[in-house]
Image: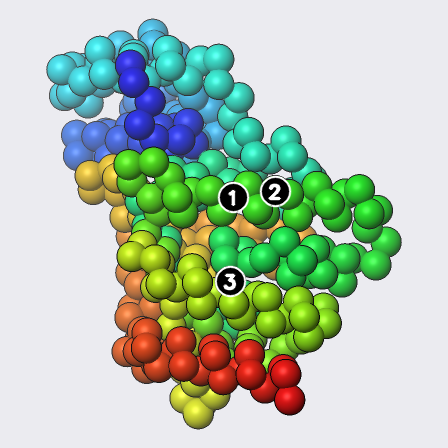
Amino acid sequence: MTRLLSPAVYRRMIAFELQRMRKAADITQQEAAEKLGCSRVRINHFESMRNLPRSADVEVLLPYYGAAERVEEFRDVIAMLKDVPHASDLARLAEVPRGFDIYLGLEQGAHSIRSYEAMIFPGLLQTPEYAGALMRGHDDDLPEEEAHRRTELRLARQQVLARQGTPLELTTVIDESVLRRRIGDARIMREQFDHLLEMSARNNITVRILGADVGVHPALHGPFTLMDFAIPGDPGVVYLEDRLGGRYYEDADEIDEYIGVMEHLLARSLEESESRRLLRQAREELIR
């Protein structure tokens, strides 16, 4: 089978489809477990990406769900993933927060990403020196070698923006306060502005600035990321991160809530041309 998506997205597809087909057949996890001769927890692990089912498992479950015609498709995907590590290859470049290894794989296979950035410029659009200054400032005790590895990881992630055939579609809303928050010295900030202006000219990248005069808005709880995948019926994922790690929201109602917030932010943020004007203005202020 030809690989078109990242392994993490294929794993997600299997988990999502197993859950969708079971629910469509009005079968509980306990009933599925009894049919397979296992615990309900094992079925839950199949449906949450924790464990990949065996071919023998789907040969029993799919006919039970009324989807016998998809057994061969699932066997092919499982065989392809059998020798692929669960964690993203990128996660081997440096230590990552809890849950971020899954994020890396999903990011590499996402069709589109929409994000709100309240504190820093988005990782996919950072320069090496801006990223490095962040890594070192985030942890004063971080060894220089590890800071370098984490910076290299961040840069490696950016290759998805130039992915062959289907580059990632990135839309990001950046709070105006990020433009005024100095990370590193003035030279690092100027280079970051130049890079952001250059990247925002690409067809697959949209940068919008949420002006300081907007005041109260529904994303004052902080930054978030919405990921969409090329999987029919998959509502996507919302990812939130704090200092200790990340967490995901995958229920359709939860995702719809964040989609509504993103639409609100886009409606109130500056248009692309005005956003670029403000970026240039902020850059010039560093020279004065």
- Which residue shows up at 72% across the image and 61% down it? 133
- Identify which residue, 207 or 276, lies in the foreground: 276
Q: CA distance from mark 3 to mark 1?
A: 16 Å
- Residue wearing tag 3: 195
Residue type, numbered disc 2: Leu
Where is residue 211? Give x, y as percent: 43, 85
Dot 2 surroundings within 10 Å: few (below 14), some, or many (20 or more)? some
Where is residue 156? Give x, y as percent: 55, 41
In the image, taking residue 262 as reference, residue 119 lies left or right, namely: right
**What numbered label is drawn on residue 157?**
1
Is there any visible trace of residue 100 in the rendered image?
no
- Which residue shows up at 49% across the image and 47% down it? 158
Q: Is residue 51 above or below residue 60?
A: below
In the image, taking residue 74 as reference, residue 48 lies left or right, namely: right
Q: CA distance from mark 3 to mark 2?
A: 18 Å
In the image, taking residue 265 as reference, residue 121 lies left or right, namely: right
Where is residue 192? Give x, y as percent: 57, 66
Picture colour scheme: rainbow
- Residue wearing tag 2: 153
In the image, taking residue 224 as reference, residue 135 lies left or right, namely: right
- Which residue shows up at 34% across the image and 36% down it? 164
Residue lying at the far front in this picture: please name it.
287
